[in-house]
Amino acid sequence: MNPPKETVIGHPVAAQAHAAGHVEEKHAGGQVSLEPGAVKSDKKGESRIRRWNVGNVKITSVMESADRIPWQAIFPAETSGLYKKYDWLVPRFMTPEGQIILAVQAFVLTVGGRRIVVDTCVGNDKPREIEQCNNLQTAFLKDLTAAGFPPETIDTVLCTHLHFDHVGWNTRLRDGSWVPTFPRARYLFGRRDLEFFSKQRHEATHREAFDDSVAPILDAGLADIIDSDAGVHREIGDGIWLEDVSGHSPGNLCLIAECGGERA
Ligand SMILES: [Zn+2]
């Protein structure tokens, strides 16, 4: 996959939207100002907003964080020089020193009057076993609002899978309780992931995320469960549908947008 020049930094484990067309960039609630293409390693308070179109679908990405992590945290150490074969990786996806730039971000799709948030990052105030994700205090929600998407205007939230870094902003802390961040939205969860993560209790970060970011949505009656058996394509309307891409998680879903002659 050779991304276009102005693509966003992709989260390697997320369903990825491909950039096309014009990209704007602005900063709202973040404490830092970033040059286009630059990535700050300080996690907390970092923010970035990007916009582009794919056919009739308007896509906005709101970045929660971008960390630099060692190659061998994800890939075998003996392959650590491979990135040099692909010059487009540096500096947007890799540092010149060979560290991976791991971006956590949400995508907002607007099409046919709908506003769909795809994946909700790590979230604020969440106790997490992974130190750099523990009790984040980022400007994500402020940025989302500044980008034109106050939480109450979102009608659909899709969690492509239920890992902790894709469900966090499903909820936020209010008076000591986890309440839905997007009170007017239907939240879409894949059935197989839901069944798996409701029972798995051995990986602390995913267990914690299920309890504070998925269960409260179920309790609030805001969830729609997607049957995600292999081969199932689930239409969600306006040229957008879901496909099963299980593997990374038991019920991983991929969102496809094909509208106005282009496909993301
Ligand atoms: Zn994941």
Image: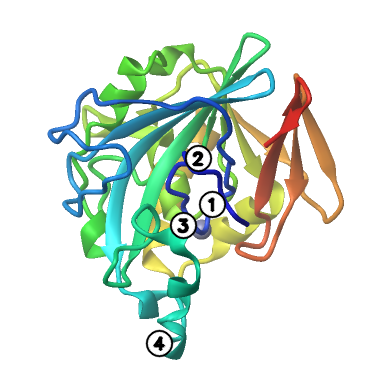
Write down the quadrant of residue 258 in the picture. Answer: top right
State the separation of the CA atoms marked 4 and 1. 23 Å
SS for callout 1: loop
- Whichever of callouts 3 and 4 sits on the residue coming sooner in the sequence is 4
In screen coordinates, is 134 left or right of 113? Answer: left
State the separation of the CA atoms marked 3 and 1. 20 Å
Q: Which residue is mark 4?
A: 77
- Whichever of callouts 3 and 1 sits on the residue coming sooner in the sequence is 1
- In the rendered structure, which amino acid carries the disc numbered 4? Ala
Q: Which residue is mark 2?
A: 119
On the image, the x and y values in percent for residue 193 come to 63, 54
Write down the quadrant of residue 55 in the picture. Answer: top right
- In the rendered structure, which amino acid carries the disc numbered 2? Asp
Q: Foreground: 105 or 68?
A: 68
On the image, the x and y values in percent for residue 147 come to 36, 18
State the separation of the CA atoms marked 4 and 2. 30 Å
Residue 193's label in the rendered image is none
Give the mark toward the camera: 2 or 3.
3
Residue extending furthest toward the right? 231
Q: Which residue is mark 3?
A: 88
Question: Mark 4 CB in 8 Å range of ligand 1?
Answer: no
Residue 14's label in the rendered image is 1
**Image position of 82 with respect to 64: above or below:** below
Could you tell me which residue is drawn at 38 percent across and 48 percent down? 104
Residue extending furthest toward the left? 31
**Image position of 209 with respect to 141: above or below:** below
- Whichever of callouts 4 and 1 sits on the residue coming sooner in the sequence is 1
Question: Mark 1 CB in 8 Å range of ligand 1?
Answer: yes
